[in-house]
């Protein structure tokens, strides 16, 4: 059912941020607020120039763009190239599934999420850039899909619940992987530190 993964993961994220995340975290309120806004607006659509948009997808796209607002011109160029790689890969996945679905051993949105998540992990080093860069890439991919399918007179809604499912699952996979990287780095540093009472040999 379209939207199940999106609602399940975003509600789980909101509960975690609201009740379990450290209250001293400076991003706690903002994350909880925007998650709630995205959940509420996901069922509403607006029409701009005969194009149907999910309000949640517009909010996600704009929020993700603001994450790179302080980057230098050279950094923005580098990020743009990586985002375009994600967008092309994601839209290609959809077109292949429409043309020859036998290539997909599981449903296209889930296969797309796994592919894009690991591609994002390879392209980006920081968790923040992975999440927001991937979100922008998937929104651009949605736009490419709309422009292509519209020429074939196939009705397509930008930011549909199926797309939000894929985006939520992708961000979840990235979060799990990034969390494992953080734990590995944390315990590696702990093991490298001398125990109490020990002296560091030169």
Image (tube, rainbow, N blue to C red):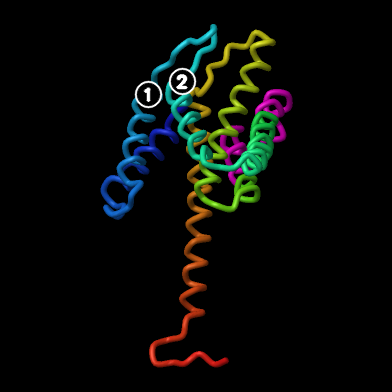
Q: Marks 1/2: CA distance? A: 8 Å
How many residues crowd around disc 1 within 10 Å: few (fewer than 14), some, or many (20 or more)? some
**Residue depicted at x 32% and y 36%:** 33
Please state the horizontal and vertical placement of residue 198, each as a whole percent of the image.
44, 92
Above or below: residue 90 compared with residue 149: below
Of residues 7 and 67, the one drawn nearer to the viewer in this rendering:
67
Picture quarter with the C terminus: bottom right
Q: Which residue is pictured at 44% across the width and 27% down the height?
A: 59
Q: Which residue is mark 2?
A: 54
**Residue 201: x, y in percent?**
54, 92
Q: Is residue 30 above or below residue 38?
A: below
- The mark that comes first in sequence, 1 or 2, is 1
Res. 30 image quadrant: top left
**Left or right: 193 as drawn, with respect to 28:** right
Label 1: which residue?
41
Closer to the camera, 185 or 8? 185
Q: Is residue 157 left or right of residue 16?
A: right
Which of 27/95 is in front? 27
Task: Identify the main secondary structure in magenta.
Answer: helix
Residue positioned 60% across, 22% down in the render: 143
Is 195 one of the magenta-colored residues?
Answer: no
Q: Are marks 1 and 2 in contact (CB under 8 Å)?
A: yes
Disc 1 secondary structure class: helix
Left or right of residue 76: residue 56: left
Magenta segment range?
94-117
Q: Residues within 10 Å of mark 2 (few under 14, many from 20)?
A: many
Q: Position of residue 18 (x, y in %)?
A: 28, 45
The structure residue drawn at horizontal position 48% and vertical position 10%, both measured from the top left corner, is 47
Image: 74 above or below 21: above
Per the image, label 2 sits on a secondary structure element best described as strand
């Amino acid at each position: 059912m379209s939207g199940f993964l999106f609602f399940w993961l975003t509600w789980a994220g909101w509960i975690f941020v609201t009740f379990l995340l450290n209250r001293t975290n400076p991003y706690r309120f903002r994350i909880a607020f925007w998650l709630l806004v995205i959940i509420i607006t996901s069922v509403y659509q607006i029409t701009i120039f005969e194009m149907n948009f999910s309000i949640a997808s517009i909010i996600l796209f704009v929020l993700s763009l603001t994450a790179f607002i302080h980057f230098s011109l050279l950094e923005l160029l580098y990020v743009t190239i990586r985002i375009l790689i994600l967008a092309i890969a994601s839209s290609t996945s959809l077109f292949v599934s429409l043309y020859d679905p036998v290539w997909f051993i599981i449903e296209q949105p889930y296969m797309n999420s796994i592919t894009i998540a690991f591609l994002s992990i390879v392209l980006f080093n920081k968790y923040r850039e992975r999440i927001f860069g991937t979100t922008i890439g998937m929104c651009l991919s949605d736009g490419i899909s709309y422009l292509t399918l519209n020429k074939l007179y196939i009705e397509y809604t930008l930011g549909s619940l199926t797309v939000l499912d894929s985006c939520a699952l992708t961000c979840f996979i990235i979060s799990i992987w990034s969390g494992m990287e953080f734990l590995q780095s944390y315990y590696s540093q702990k093991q490298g530190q001398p125990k109490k009472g020990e002296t560091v040999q030169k």
